[in-house]
Amino acid sequence: MMPDDLPLPPAALRLRLDTAALASNWRALDALSGRARAGAAIKADCYGLGMSAALPTLAAAGCQDWFVAHWQEAAAAVRHVPAAQVSMLHGPMTDAEAVYARALGVRPVLNSLEQVRRWLRAGGGACELMVDTGMSRLGLPLGDILDPAIAKLEIETCMSHLASADEDSGQNAAQLGRFRDVMRAVPARRYSFANSAGIALGPDYHCDLTRPGLALYGGVPRGELAGKIAQVAYPEAAVIQVRQLAAGDSVGYNATFTADRAMRVGVIAIGYADGYLRCWSGRGYVLWHGQRLPVLGRVSMDMTIVDLTAAENCGEGDWLALEYTLPEAAAASGLSQYELLTLLGRRFARCQ
């Protein structure tokens, strides 16, 4: 019998997506956006949570504007939502990409005069324009916004991006002042400036369309959003072996943990290949019916060892949840909330 003919055993990793929390987060961010409407950044497979589940949930909640970073993501998005609602942030790098955008029906975000001219050569049409107001990443330099080619565009959304919205930084107000100058100089149907953290900065930053990403998926980039954003992602790993340790037995690579007493430990099917990085070694926790169980020793590629001494009823085949509330997990691991989500690997079975 060929492998494709055999039923595949269930994965020993699963990522549970709380779709009700995801929808609630979008509605909260939409309300916090005031007179503006909230869109959704869905790049990186909806920040690692899976476009096939997350995108329909957000659409059903009311979202109508979608932002991706690669053409593959645009192609995946239009399977779920109208192409005219999808914006491709990196813009057309070649003439062929400009032709592809027109054929697919998505709006490219033009980031330079070269991309502007490329889009016009391809026939033009509805597009977005990104202007750099101080991040020095993508975006048209301020000195180029009066170029005659800009006046030939059909700009649906003129946008910029905040560099330090998650901090109380003077850069935020400086960028806002520059973007107000852009709004006066560049005609567009609407204007967009705020990401998740920018929404929390208040109505001056909201313009017509906000572009939340992290907060949709459970991240809290600013304290003002605490209590308004619910956890969405719940990674879980199965126990694949239970072992008994005696005092003096060491655990894992390089023997970074040695038992000082008799212990019962479990090997769970997750490691750094799944995005559970070595920074969790000796500092992470898993949950068994709400009970916290510490990670012991060094996280390896496919396995992590946890202390089951206090969880007598937990055995092989049982599921343990990672302690993964994003703000707390970021503080414990040293990873950003963005990394915690987008590092989650393909071996997780995405489920609801």
Image: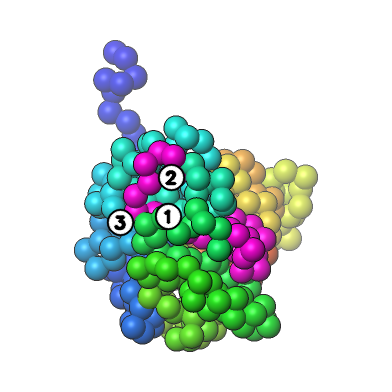
Q: Quadrant of residue 87?
A: bottom left
Sequence-earlier tag: 1 or 3: 3
In the rendered structure, the answer to whether residue 17 lies left or right of residue 196 reads left
Instruction: Tell me whether circle 2 and circle 3 mark residues in contact (CB < 8 Å).
Output: no
- State the mark number for residue 152: 1
Percent coordinates x, y for residue 89 in the rendering: 48, 53
Q: Is residue 188 above or below residue 69?
A: below
Q: Which mark is residue 350?
A: none
Tell me which segment is drawn in magenta.
119-144
Q: Do labels 1 and 2 touch, CB within 8 Å?
A: yes
The amino acid marked with disc number 3 is Gln
In the displayed structure image, the side of residue 190 where residue 220 appears, left or right: right
Which secondary structure, mark 3? Answer: helix
Q: Taking 325 as reference, is 14 left or right? A: left
Helix, strand or loop for disc 2: helix
Decide which of 315, 221 is in the foreground and name it: 221
Q: Which percent across, then down, holds residue 272?
A: 61, 46
**Above/below status of 282 relative to 208:** above
Residue type at mark 1: give it: Lys
